[in-house]
Structure formats: C-alpha cells, structure tokens
Amino acid sequence: MLKRTSPSGGGRHPTEGILLIRKAIGNIKEGNYAYDTETHSLVKLDNSNIKLDHILPEGTDFSILFTVCPERAMWRYRDIRAFRPMLIDIGHVIETFKLLISKASYNLIKGGITEATEVAEALGINWMEEPAFNILHVGIEKMNLNNQNEIYTPVFLKKLVNRESSYSALNLLTNPFSWIKIKNGVIFLNIIYPEQRQLHLNISDLEVLTHCLPSQRGDRLTDIKNILNSVNYYNEDPEKRLYNLINNYGLIPESIAKGWYNHIAKWSIYGWYPSLLQHAHTITELSYKKNSSLYEESPRREFENLENSLMKRKTVREFENDIVTFESFKNIIDSIFPITEGLSLNIYIVAFNITKIKNGCYKIINKDDCWQIKKTGISLNRKEFQDLAIGQYPASAGAFNILMINEMDVSSSKKYEEQFISLGKLGQRICLTATREDLGVFLTPAVKDKALFEKLGITQYDRCATYLFSIGVPKGER
Ligand SMILES: Cc1cc2nc3c(=O)[nH]c(=O)nc-3n(C[C@H](O)[C@H](O)[C@H](O)COP(=O)(O)O)c2cc1C
C-alpha cells in the first residue's frame, strides 16, 4: 500500500502536482517534472522546453502547479456532489505544500485558479481533461515581492476570441457551454465559455440553435447558407441575427466545438456535466484580481514535527474509548486559525470524552485572535452522528467531533470552488495536528444536510457545506 501525506475522498487521489523548475536546484536541472510514486523520483516531462517566463511572476525559482484528473473520482462517484470532495482533496494537498514552504522560509507567491489554468494551458494541458486549480510560485532567496493586483484576462482565453475571421464557409455547432433560460416570457441564452455572455433569443434563434446541435447521423448541414435555408426567419435581417449568435459564441466553428463535445461526453456519462459547466464559469470569471485568491496567513502557531506528522498521517476508522486531553484538543482547534479568507465558517464541537470539558455540543467563538467554546444546548449523541454521516460508524466513534459548516458565498463560481478548497486546507491542518498529538482522524463531507442543519437550527441548508471530523485515540496504538 502506498502511504500518502493527504487523505482523499474514496482513496481516488485525483490531484496531480507538476513541478516547474525555472532555475536549477542542486542536481535538478531546469524543466518540468512529475513525481513517480513507483521509483520515488522526479521524472522530466515532455513539455519541459515550453517557456513560461512570460506568465510566471518575477522572483520565482520553482512553481508547483496543481491539476486534477477528475476521471479518477468520477468513474466511482457518479453524482454531482462528488465534485466537492475533489475540491477538498486539492485543499489538503496545497496546505501540505504551503506548510513545507513556510517551514523552509521560502518566498511564496500564491496563484489562483485563473493563473493555474493559464500555466496549464501553456503546457498543453487541456482544462476539460485535467483542470488546474492552483499554482504556488516559490522563490528561494528572500526578496520583497510585489503583490500584482491587476485584473487580467488569461492569454488562452484571449486566443479563443475572434479566432476565425470568416465564417461563411464553416460548419457551425451550438456551443455546449451554454444554456437556455426563460424568464417573464423572454428567452435568454447564457453562454459560459469562452466568455460569459447573455443573449435575448427569438424563436428563430432557438430554431438555429436546435438545428446546429451535433447530429447523430452527421448529415445535417450547418454552414451559414444551409442554416439560413432551413430556418424560417421572419421580420428581421436573418444574416445579422445569425452573426449575433456567432459573435457572442452561441455558435462555434465545428473544428473547435467538436473537440469540446468529445471532452464533455466523458463528464456527462458519469453525471458530472454540471460540474464541468461550473468550472467553465469559474475560469471565465474575469472581474478577478491576480493573486487575490486563497490568501490566508500562516497558522498562528508554527507546526512542530511537520515531516513526522506527514509521514504518519492516515485515516482512522476505529477508536479506543480513551479520554483525549484538553491540551491536545486545544492544539487541534488552534491549528484551524486563522481561518482562510473567504470562508464564513461556523465551527461546532461535540465533546464525548475530553478532559476538562463536559460532554455536549459547543460552538467556537473566535474573537480578537483567540477562541472560546460556548455551550449550545443542542444534544447530539453518537448514534445520531452515525446516522448523520449516512450510516458511517466511525463518525460516531471518536472522543470528540468537529463540524465545520461553511455558509457558502455563491456570488461567484470561483469563490464557490475556492471555499471547498479552503475547507480542505483547514482539514489538512486538523489531520496533521491530531497526528502529532498521537490521535486519529476520520473525516467526511458526506452528511445528511437537512437533518444536520435542522438539528443545529440552520435554516439555509441549501447554502451550507459541511466537513465533519471525528477524532480520538486510534484503536490498538496505545
Ligand atoms: C474529502 C474527503 C472525503 C472523505 N470521505 C470519506 C468517507 O465518507 N468515508 C470514509 O470512510 N473515508 C472518507 N475519507 C477518507 C479516505 O477514504 C482516505 O483518505 C483514503 O482512503 C486514503 O486513506 P488514508 O487517508 O489512510 O491515506 C475522505 C477523505 C477526504 C479527503
């Protein structure tokens, strides 16, 4: 069995790290590398000679690009909610690197989803095949790095725009990254990729979009002349209306759209198509500042024994009935703070067996750089926890449980994805601190939302996401 420093939903480990070395480090030459688990070595990638100087920030000696192979997770979890653990997984991995980089006192310039997507595309990694979610740029020498805060459009999106100068001879297909909404009797086409647009449609436009859906038999003619022949336009200049659809990406040249449909087929057979749309929306969200994402300070206290904890960490599913000391409990809660910017987190503790704390459900109140626990009056017993964690016994077996419940900010797609990544980052801190305290962790985001939130008095349960931890003395290890 391979040992991993991070947990991963269903053991799928879809996160990949690509190391981009810009300046030789010791014996390791400049180039792009992947880690080969069989030989425990870095393997140089074919794309090593692609120059990235124009997109990597100044002062970078090496970068770690985090991408995801969604297929590893989606063939097993064929429902849309499985996108969450995939994002949480990335957070766990990123946090490990961040802690190691900070321990080495290197300079860290954080990138977000947009920067990562841009670098991945430059390396020839297609975002529909292997989306990128984060990039950490690291400078070995200490220097003052300016935070670049300008709003920018990634080059790869710019390239897609206005790619074709003449459409007259081209076959066109309906953009699969678009959807139709009808509101107050008006039909809208919402386009997500390669740019976000919203168009008013008339009935004829709708007919065009239906006509240009990929045909199973492949015998439908979809060049401009044939579209105009097949659709009953009335009142307006038909060619003008058609170009309105083309210029706003409602219709896409077949040569490009066919590739998109091929990628989408994979996501849709596993029921993950809405998650692909979600991510497309994320990468085209442009009112977004460079390096402003996933910002957070380092943990309040330095991580002791980080390497040891990383080597020892594993998911625990059976616990002793032993009591956990208040000191260990306190260290674990301390490690959660400061909470990643962008989260709006309610943290509940349910104590079953901690010294100095009466059994019961508490809420953590964080104020002026310190936290306190406050009794809630809610009762949650072990059996209820098993039920809330969709029948999983380990959720009921630790000495105490932590419930991280985030009130999701859904005002932006990027923020939506980042909040799950951030939950994973905090989760990794919990895992590593508990391991250092010789405690075991069971963790899951798979909870019955409605039942849990009703119990906690949370009314907006369609807007909250939970990450549950059960922590205690691992069975047979003391
Ligand atoms: C986001 C996430 C969700 C998880 N959900 C569950 C779960 O519902 N049930 C479970 O038994 N383990 C769950 N795990 C733990 C994984 O199964 C475990 O990490 C994986 O099998 C690898 O084993 P290891 O953590 O011991 O290295 C989850 C882990 C993560 C990161």
Image: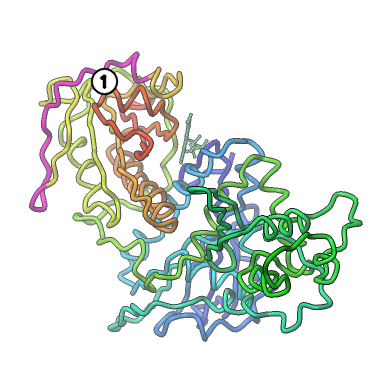
Please, is residue 235 above or below residue 1 in the view? Answer: below
Q: Is residue 348 left or right of residue 242?
A: left
Asked whether the viewer can see residue 51, the reply is yes
For residue 201: magenta?
A: no
Give the camera-side residue of 169 and 20: 169
Q: Is residue 328 left or right of residue 256?
A: left
Quarter holding the C terminus is top left
The structure residue drawn at horizontal position 78% and vertical position 56%, both measured from the top left corner, is: 211
Residue 94 location (% of width, % of height)? 42, 57
Percent coordinates x, y for residue 167 in the rendering: 76, 77
Specify whether residue 384 is painted magenta.
Answer: yes
Q: Which residue corresponds to mark 1?
A: 322
Residue occupying image coordinates x 41% and y 52%: 416
Q: Is residue 380 above or below residue 95?
A: above
Q: Residue 121 location in percent, x, y?
A: 61, 71
Say which quadrant the N terminus sits in: top right
Image quarter of residue 232: bottom right
Residue at disc 1, secondary structure: loop
| Residue shown at the point (50%, 78%) measured from the top left | 26
**Type of the residue with mark 1:** Asp
Residue drawn at x 47%, y 75% as measured from the top left = 62
In the displayed structure, 215 sits above or below 464; it is below
Extreme-front residue of the structure? 235
- 117 or 187, which is in the foreground? 187
* Magenta segment: 367-385
Badge 1 crowding class, 10 Å Cα cut-off, few under 14, some 14 to 19, many 20 or more, is some
Q: How far from the left and from the top, in percent, is residue 442?
A: 40, 31
Q: 241 or 399, which is in the foreground?
A: 241
- Please tell me whether residue 397 is drawn above or below residue 132 in the rendered image: above
Q: Quadrant of residue 357?
A: top left
